Amino acid sequence: MKIPRVPLTLQLSAIRLLREKLELASNKLEKTFTEPTLNYRQRGTTAGSAYLAEWQIRLNPVLLIENGEAFIQEVIPHELAHLLVYRCFGRAGITPHGKEWQWMMQEVLEVTPQRTHKFSVESVKSQGFMYHCRCPQPHELSLRRHNKVQRGTSQYLCRKCKEPLSWLATPQQKS
Ligand SMILES: [Zn+2]
Ligand SMILES: [Zn+2]
């Protein structure tokens, strides 16, 4: 799947909000934070994700283009809060949308904490075959690759955990 180009106005708007919220956090927490990098490589039905160690926010370009400003207002603070929680509290004993994240959203970034997004995902729904390994995120294989695996002519390994991918006929519900 090709990554659609995000219009410059939306990119600027996303950066503007990111800087605004980061400044708010710096003032309230009396701490300086480097600006996280933003990119548009999030795929699937996920709106965005925060890469803690990489200090990076990935946004879903399809959902961003479809939902515009509403997407930016919701997803940027949500993912930024994950990064800030990591920087302030570390990783041990922290649940992704737990107390610390909710506090960061409400008290620091001044937005209502919402765990999941409500954007329509019709256009980004998976068309392929969902394969699993040891990682929580499934991998999507095209029909061509799926057929190769089922015929036994190919095997694909997860790049992260190195496990062979196996097909689950009933896809797991995404949370
Ligand atoms: Zn989250
Ligand atoms: Zn894996």
Image (tube, helix red, strand yellow):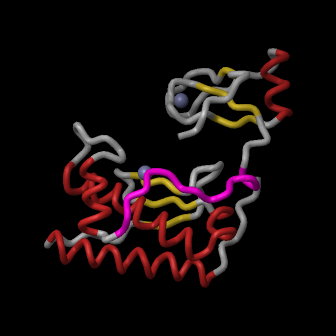
Residue 112 drawn in magenta? yes
Left or right of residue 63: residue 48: left
The quadrant holding residue 64 is: bottom right
Q: Residue at x 36, y 80 (%)?
A: 20
Left or right of residue 29: residue 79: right
Q: Residue at x 84, y 33 (%)?
A: 143
Q: Is residue 15 above or below residue 103?
A: below
Where does the image place residue 37, in percent across and percent down from the top left? 44, 66
Q: Is residue 83 above or below residue 38?
A: above
Residue 55 drawn in magenta? no
In this rendered view, identify the residue nearer to me: 113 or 76. 113
In this rendered view, identify the residue nearer to me: 162 or 13. 13
In this rendered view, identify the residue nearer to me: 175 or 54. 175
Q: Residue at x 54, y 25 (%)?
A: 162
The quadrant holding residue 25 is: bottom left
Q: Main secondary structure of the magenta part?
A: loop
Where does the image place residue 22, in percent across and percent down from the top left? 31, 73
For the record, the magenta segment spans 111-124
Total number of numbered discs in the rendering: 0
Residue furthest out toward the top = 152
Q: Residue at x 85, y 16 (%)?
A: 151
Where does the image place residue 49, in percent across and percent down from the top left? 48, 53
Left or right of residue 87: residue 156: right
Where does the image place residue 58, in percent across and percent down from the top left? 51, 59
